[in-house]
Amino acid sequence: MSKRTSKTGISARFGARYGVSVRSNAGKVLRKKNKKYTCPVCHYQKVSRISTGIWSCGKCDHTFAGGAWEPFTRASDANQRITRRATTGATSADMAYIATQAALEYERSIAAAEDEEEE
């Protein structure tokens, strides 16, 4: 007797409809949406989605804006880094990154100057 295939968790409600990859992608998104996340204020894993982009902690009632499917996105991480630098100053890791970027820009300008001299 053959082994039965397993359903794909939360996307099992779609049954045999819509195709494998669509059901798989929908399952990934639905799992992200329904997952409990850690609250940035009380640090308990009680943050759930209220509506699109609005997240709320069930313990401390802290409500904040985030991504549509996850409360913390790459853009929000970058924004937090920028505001932290503006308020507390840059950390050593930030300074190393800034120095690396400055060195790359310097090398690019030298290479561009050499190219202009050759022409």
Image (cartoon, helix red, strand yellow):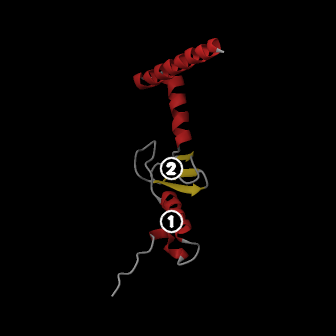
Label 2 or label 1, whichever comes before in sequence order: 1
The disc label shown at residue 61, or none? 2
Instruction: Report which residue position mark 1 lands on.
Output: 24
Which-is-in-front pick, marks 2 and 1?
1
Q: Position of residue 24 (x, y in %)?
A: 50, 65
Q: Position of residue 58 (x, y in %)?
A: 47, 54
The answer to whether 20 is drawn above or below residue 100 in the figure is below
Front residue of this view, candidates 13 and 62: 13
Residue 49 vs 117, above or below: the answer is below
Q: Residue at x 41, y 25 (%)?
A: 93
Residue type at tag 1 = Ser
Instruction: Give residue 7's quadrant in the image.
Output: bottom left
Residue at the outermost bottom position: 1
On the image, the x and y values in percent for residue 71 come to 52, 48
Are circles 2 and 1 on residues that touch, CB within 8 Å? no
Specify the farthest residue to the left: 1
List x then y, in percent, for residue 27: 50, 65
